[in-house]
Image: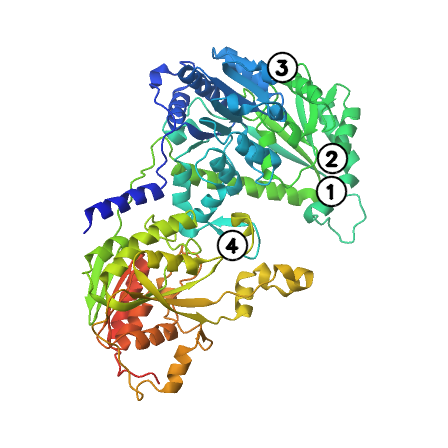
């Protein structure tokens, strides 16, 4: 075994296995601000060491003091400038919090205000500054990165691309909001959103832009998040006491107003969709506003009233004499002054929309909220609720939802999402134990070898296990490699398909290519089944093709092979269209704009010859290989391959497998073996799968060696090879 080559491969696996390099520095925990809780100190120390990280902590767990101390420590280390970006009106609250913890914060309005130390400004003003002068940046309420097409998100990523120290702080993100996590990942220079999607997600071909976690990748994904983000809802989530962080009681009351519109049925039917919901809201607007005003006017307490329509906001303001309204049309000065006035208790009743006042502000002084109607956005509801119901709130919190009978569907939707969110967050936080560092060394994995009548099946990493095969001992090799990251069959870093981009796949594949050349006899052949790879607009920026076939040819030519043959295998475009819903194959696209239409994807068998003279010629006779058969084999296009003629595969599938196992058609294997190998030749496949190449090899009187990484496939392959060894038949092509 080549020790240097083996060490190089191990180093590659470490790099592939999310081994994030610390970009920060160590600070003894005793040097952290003593006013912080122990769990907050531990998080700050971890974030300082990482240099670029995120804190996803529930409302009231102290993200503000943690980000202030993080910024303070970096100022001490660099004697430089740190910028905190915050939502409107949060700057003043942050400055007051800094005074409490002995940390000076300078609110800036223009470039000339910047000086050494910690500066803070609102997101709305970021365009006024040259941010290259800052050594570090904090995004307060970093959920602003949620919209992956948003101008603000793109601007923030671009502006702070080269900033040495970065911290993103937000409440725990929705477990299924992968775009928000991907955008955080990209902002922090961990990897691009597209790379993250390639490694852990699968695109729903029938719904462009919809991504879901690959079944086998879920745990690995959340552990990956744990390499750069702390996620907690309570200090106990990361091993600290949570006794001081117990939320007060939350009392939620839905007040249903009778539907007084004309009904075609005996009972009121809930509306479906946003259009019907909006129509229903307008019909019940006056009654809902009157009921909301009645609650607020009959109390001396502070009230926070949430609405969704401008007419709701204006009507409520008219019905409640001592209220203050904040609308989208108001100046930033009015918005900021009103939010701060409400936080201080100077304003008794505040009326606004969730998207205006629902993020960042601490309103623990208020414990009564009204939703004058309800939408379908759980995130909006959650954030709005958490302005008052948060750690530090001293009273039980009352929430009143004023709804018409037709809006009951929105309430049920929110309740279901709330239940799902809690269950999923509990599961995720149990996985993301960031305080206990994720092990970034290549993981141990199972290996085994099974021999039988004419075959050797090996369980393991083909890059490592191929080194156990003697030089120039294989007569012919045929296989179907992973198609870059198009299909990923396991969460192992040894799985070539488990790559964040094409470049990483090709780097991985090169480790194997040179050893295939080593074990093949001089002058003998290797056939590789492949296809061109489709690009995706979301991932690659355009819809088209990548020359996967060409890349493989280049790799094998670089290790010493000659490129000598190629056959195209016809595939039915109708079947492809039905399976993939690819835009370029849809007939409706032809009618809309055929410039975006193209042909379906064929398969290829590309064959290479190792340099040197073949010492054991492969001879055929006219009797065993008639000319009419040769004419069929010699065609550059095989149109008669039966796509369904594959080995049985379902028994090898695991519950978390994605896509389908893709065994090579037996027709293709049989033709290649008959044409390019002799009886008793040794045939090799580094990607054995469920044993298709070996199955045909044994039936045709050849011997077989195969390597497979995935245990369930390996076990099925062994069973298939055993069956084939009992079915050896006289060589014939008829």
Name the N-terminal-most of marks 3 and 1.
1
- Which residue position is annotated with label 1? 278
Residue farthest to the bottom, as pictured? 623
Name the N-terminal-most of marks 4 and 1.
1
Q: Quadrant of the C terminus?
A: bottom left
Say if 97 sits above or below 199 in the image. Answer: above
Disc nearest the viewer among 4 and 1: 4
Where residue 310 appears, x then y in whole percent? 75, 32
Where residue 257 appears, x then y in whole percent? 73, 38
Which of the 4 image quadrants contains residue 124?
Answer: top right
Secondary structure beneath disc 3? helix
Say if 226 sits above or below 705 in the image. Answer: above
Q: Which mark is residue 163?
A: none
Say if 105 sits above or below 13 in the image. Answer: above
Secondary structure beneath disc 2? loop
Name the N-terminal-most of marks 4 and 3.
3
Task: Count residues near mark 3 (Cα–Cα under 10 Å), then give few for <14, some for 14-19, many for 20+.
Answer: few
Disc nearest the viewer among 4 and 3: 4
Along the viewing direction, whichever of 261 and 517 lies nearer the viewer: 517
Q: Which mark is residue 344?
A: 3
Q: Is residue 239 left or right of residue 375?
A: left
Q: Which mark is residue 535?
A: 4
Where residue 165 appears, x then y in whole percent? 44, 26
Name the N-terminal-most of marks 1 and 2.
1
- Which residue position is annotated with label 2? 309
């Amino acid at each position: 075994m080549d020790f240097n080559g083996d060490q190089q491969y191990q180093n590659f696996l470490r790099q592939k296995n999310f081994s994030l390099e610390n970009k920060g520095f160590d600070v003894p925990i005793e040097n952290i601000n003593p006013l912080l809780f122990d769990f907050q100190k531990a998080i700050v120390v971890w974030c300082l060491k990482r240099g670029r990280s995120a804190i996803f902590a529930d409302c009231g767990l102290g993200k503000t003091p943690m980000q202030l101390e993080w910024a303070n420590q970096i100022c001490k280390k660099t004697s430089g400038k740190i910028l905190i970006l915050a939502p409107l009106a949060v700057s003043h609250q942050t400055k007051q919090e800094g005074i409490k913890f002995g940390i000076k914060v300078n609110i800036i309005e223009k470039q000339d205000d910047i000086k050494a130390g910690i500066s803070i400004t609102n997101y709305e003003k970021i365009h006024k500054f040259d941010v290259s002068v800052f050594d570090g940046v904090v995004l307060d309420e970093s959920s602003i990165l949620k919209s992956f097409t948003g101008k603000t998100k793109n601007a923030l990523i671009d502006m702070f691309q080269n900033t040495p120290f970065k911290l993103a702080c937000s409440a725990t993100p929705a477990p299924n909001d992968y775009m928000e996590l991907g955008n955080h990942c990209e902002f922090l220079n961990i990897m691009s959103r597209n790379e993250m999607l390639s490694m852990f997600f699968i695109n729903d071909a029938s719904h462009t832009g919809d991504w879901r976690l690959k079944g086998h990748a879920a745990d690995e994904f959340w552990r990956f998040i744990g390499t750069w983000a702390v996620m907690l809802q309570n200090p106990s989530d990361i091993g600290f006491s949570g006794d001081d962080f117990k939320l007060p009681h939350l009392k939620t009351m839905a007040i249903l107003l009778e539907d007084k519109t004309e009904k075609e049925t005996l009972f009121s039917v809930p509306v479906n969709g946003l259009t019907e919901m909006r129509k229903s809201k307008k019909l019940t607007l006056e009654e809902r506003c009157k009921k909301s005003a009645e609650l607020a006017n009959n109390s001396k307490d502070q009230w926070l009233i949430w609405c969704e329509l401008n007419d709701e906001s204006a009507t409520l303001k008219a019905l409640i004499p001592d209220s203050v309204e904040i609308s989208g049309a108001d100046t930033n000065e009015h918005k900021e002054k009103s939010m701060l006035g409400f936080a201080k208790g100077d304003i008794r009743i505040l009326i606004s929309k969730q998207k205006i006042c629902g993020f960042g502000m601490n309103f623990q002084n208020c414990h009564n909220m009204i939703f004058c109607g309800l939408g379908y956005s759980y995130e909006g509801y959650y954030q709005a609720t958490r302005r008052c119901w948060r750690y530090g709130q001293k009273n039980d919190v009352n929430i009143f939802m004023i709804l018409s009978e037709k809006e009951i569907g929105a309430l049920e939707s929110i309740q279901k999402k709330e239940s799902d969110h809690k269950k999923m967050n509990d599961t995720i936080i149990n996985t993301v134990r960031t305080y206990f560092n994720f092990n970034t060394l290549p993981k141990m994995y199972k290996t085994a070898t099974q021999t039988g009548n004419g075959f050797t099946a090996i369980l393991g990493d083909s890059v490592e296990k191929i080194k156990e095969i003697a030089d120039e001992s294989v007569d012919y090799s045929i296989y179907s490699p992973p198609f870059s990251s198009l299909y990923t069959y396991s969460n192992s870093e040894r799985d070539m398909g488990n790559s964040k981009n094409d470049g990483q796949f090709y780097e991985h594949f090169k480790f194997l290519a040179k050893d295939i050349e080593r074990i093949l006899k001089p002058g003998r052949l290797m056939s590789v089944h492949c296809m061109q790879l489709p690009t995706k607009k979301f991932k690659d920026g355009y819809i088209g093709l990548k020359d996967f076939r060409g890349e493989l040819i280049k790799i094998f030519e670089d290790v010493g092979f000659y490129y000598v043959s190629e056959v195209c295998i016809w595939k039915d475009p109708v079947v492809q269209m039905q399976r993939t819903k690819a835009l370029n194959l849809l007939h409706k696209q032809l009618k809309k704009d055929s410039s975006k239409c193209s042909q379906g994807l064929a398969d290829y068998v590309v064959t290479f010859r190792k340099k040197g003279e073949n010492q054991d010629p492969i001879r055929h006779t006219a009797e065993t290989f008639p000319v009419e058969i040769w004419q069929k084999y010699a065609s550059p296009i095989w149109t008669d391959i039966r796509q369904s003629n594959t080995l049985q595969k379902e028994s090898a599938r695991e519950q978390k497998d994605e896509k389908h196992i893709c065994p090579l058609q037996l027709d293709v294997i049989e033709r290649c073996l008959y044409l390019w190998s002799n009886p008793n030749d040794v045939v090799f496949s580094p990607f054995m799968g469920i044993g298709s190449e070996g199955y045909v090899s044994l039936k045709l009187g050849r011997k077989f060696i195969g390597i497979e990484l995935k245990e369930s496939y390996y076990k099925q392959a062994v069973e298939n090879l055993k069956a084939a060894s009992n079915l050896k038949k006289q060589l014939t092509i008829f």
